[in-house]
Image (cartoon, grey):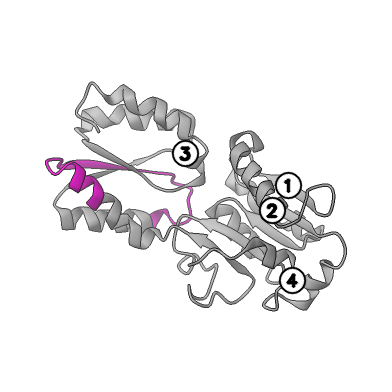
């Protein structure tokens, strides 16, 4: 699914409802629904604002942005999404699979732009990849197709590796399909796959600590906003496994 130009949303493309386009006649208000904290999203927020500015929209000058942050608590997202709808905003940009689902459940008219780590059709965000329909569009890494490729790549790099692990965030709405896709790929490749779960900082540390006792030789980290905002933490823990045969 191709990423659509964000300016099309702010410019009121013909695909969006008339009510939403009418709002854009005044200074547009963009809703930003984040699953984590702004501190963990600094670089992405910079890119978000830079993308707007390249399209001629400067925050505080000719566009306003209403931020809502769940502070890593997905159960807060529905209320935060509903609050943005009440503002109202002209469009809602979401930062994670969970926030996209919460936004979609809150409105069927306000345009939604998402970046998700699973198949948006399975998640109910769009009707199809070619013709999304409804009020949501965005991009996905298409985990349903990419999952086997991740393990295939690891298998090519480490053909002797017979034990691998998949690190998942259990709160991710697409986690079940993610696990099934990886497990199927593991069976096809003839490797053993351990599924490790981490939804907190302590659980991340525990998952990495479990790699050596399990004899894990390669690790796949499932795409998730929780992990994306902790790249430095994951990179710091990985070298600690160098004493084992983990790669």
In this rendering, the answer to whether 94 lies above or below 21 is above
Q: Which of marks 2 and 4 is nearer the N terminus?
A: 4
In this rendering, the answer to whether 67 lies above or below 233 is below
Which label sits in the foreground, 3 or 1? 1
Question: Considering depth in this image, is 63 or 17 the residue closer to the camera?
Answer: 63
Contact flag, marks 2 and 4 (Cβ < 8 Å): no
**How far, Cα to Cα, is label 1 from label 4?**
21 Å
Magenta range: 152-176
Question: Considering depth in this image, is 179 or 234 the residue closer to the camera?
Answer: 234
Residue name at image x 65 percent, y 42 percent: 46
* Place of residue 132 in the rendered image (x, y in percent of width and height, measured from the top left): 55, 74
Q: Which of marks 3 and 1 is nearer the N terminus?
A: 1
In this rendering, the answer to whether 2 lies above or below 61 is below
Q: Is residue 100 magenta?
A: no
**How far, Cα to Cα, is label 1 from label 2?**
20 Å
As drawn, the label of residue 54 is 2
Which label sits in the foreground, 4 or 3? 4
Q: Which of marks 1 and 4 is nearer the N terminus?
A: 4
Q: Label 3 belongs to which residue?
A: 199
């Amino acid at each position: 699914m191709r990423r659509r130009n964000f300016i099309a949303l702010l410019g009121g493309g013909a695909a969006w409802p008339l009510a939403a386009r009418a709002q854009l006649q005044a200074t547009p208000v963009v809703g930003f629904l984040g699953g984590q904290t702004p501190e963990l999203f600094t670089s992405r927020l910079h890119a978000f604002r830079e993308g707007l500015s390249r399209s001629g929209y400067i925050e505080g000058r000719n566009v306003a942005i209403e931020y809502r942050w769940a502070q890593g608590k997905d159960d807060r997202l529905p209320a935060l999404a509903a609050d943005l709808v009440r503002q109202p905003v002209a469009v809602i940009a979401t930062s994670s699979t969970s926030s996209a689902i919460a936004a979609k459940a809150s409105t069927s008219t306000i345009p939604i732009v998402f970046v998700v780590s699973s198949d948006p059709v399975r998640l109910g965000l769009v009707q199809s990849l070619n013709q999304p329909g409804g009020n949501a569009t965005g991009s996905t890494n298409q985990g349903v197709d990419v999952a086997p490729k991740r393990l295939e790549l690891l298998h090519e790099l480490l053909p002797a590796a017979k034990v691998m692990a998949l690190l998942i965030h259990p709160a991710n709405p697409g986690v079940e399909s993610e696990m099934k896709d990886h497990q199927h790929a593991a069976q096809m490749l003839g490797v053993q796959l351990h599924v490790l779960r981490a939804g907190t900082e302590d659980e991340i540390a525990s998952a990495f600590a479990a790699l050596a006792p399990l004899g894990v030789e390669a690790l796949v980290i499932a795409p998730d906003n929780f992990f994306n905002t902790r790249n430095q933490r994951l990179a710091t823990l990985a070298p600690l496994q160098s004493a084992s045969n983990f790669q």
